Amino acid sequence: MTKYEMAVAMGSAFGLPVEHVRPDNSQPSSSAAVKRPHDTHLASKKVEALGVGHRIAFRDGIAECLKPFV
């Protein structure tokens, strides 16, 4: 899931309009002061191998987490 998709899911969980949110598909400049990784997905294999936690769809999880604020 991209950061754009997460932002849309959070906006939707709050019942906010998200039509104005647009993904930024541009590549960082080679002269950028800070180098950013291209792929920022979190790996959970090591945690799962320990038997810790469980998976839940981001949209469901974020809606549950934000419920007290909605």
Image (cartoon, grey):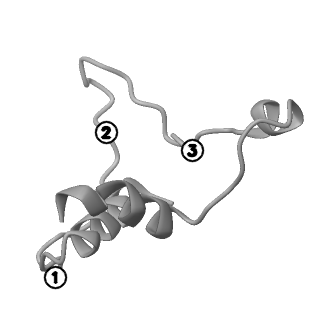
Q: Is residue 40 visible?
A: yes
Q: Which of 36 and 29 is in front in this view?
A: 36
Look at 29% across and 57% down and name the residue there.
66
* Amino acid type shown at disc 3: His
Q: Report the side of 42 relative to 70 (left or right).
A: right
As helix, strand or loop, the secondary structure at mark 1 comes to: loop
The alpha-carbon separation of the residues under discs 1 and 2 comes to 25 Å
Of the image marks 3 and 2, the number of the one nearer the N terminus: 2
Quadrant of residue 48 within the rendered picture: top right
What quarter of the picture does the C terminus occupy?
bottom left
Amino acid type at circle 1 is: Glu
Spatial CA span between label 3 and label 1: 24 Å
Q: Indicate the position of residue 4 as horizontal and vertical percent values.
A: 33, 61
To which residue does mark 3 refer?
Answer: 41
Q: Which of 28 and 1 is in front in this view?
A: 1
Q: In this view, does 35 lie to the left or right of 70?
A: right
Q: How busy is the neighbourhood of tag 3: few (under 14 within 10 Å), some, or many (20 plus)?
A: few
Label 3, label 2: how many angstroms apart (C-alpha)?
Answer: 17 Å
* Mark closer to the observer (1, 2): 1
Q: Which of marks 3 and 1 is nearer the N terminus?
A: 1
Please name the amino acid that badge 2 sits on. Pro
Q: Quadrant of residue 24?
A: bottom left
Q: Is mark 2 on a helix, strand or loop?
A: loop
Residue at the disc numbered 2: 28
Q: Name the residue under label 1.
A: 19
Residue plotted at (34% across, 47% down): 27
Label 2: how many residues lie within 10 Å, few (<14), some (14-19) or many (20+)?
Answer: few
Work out whether residue 24 can be spotted.
no
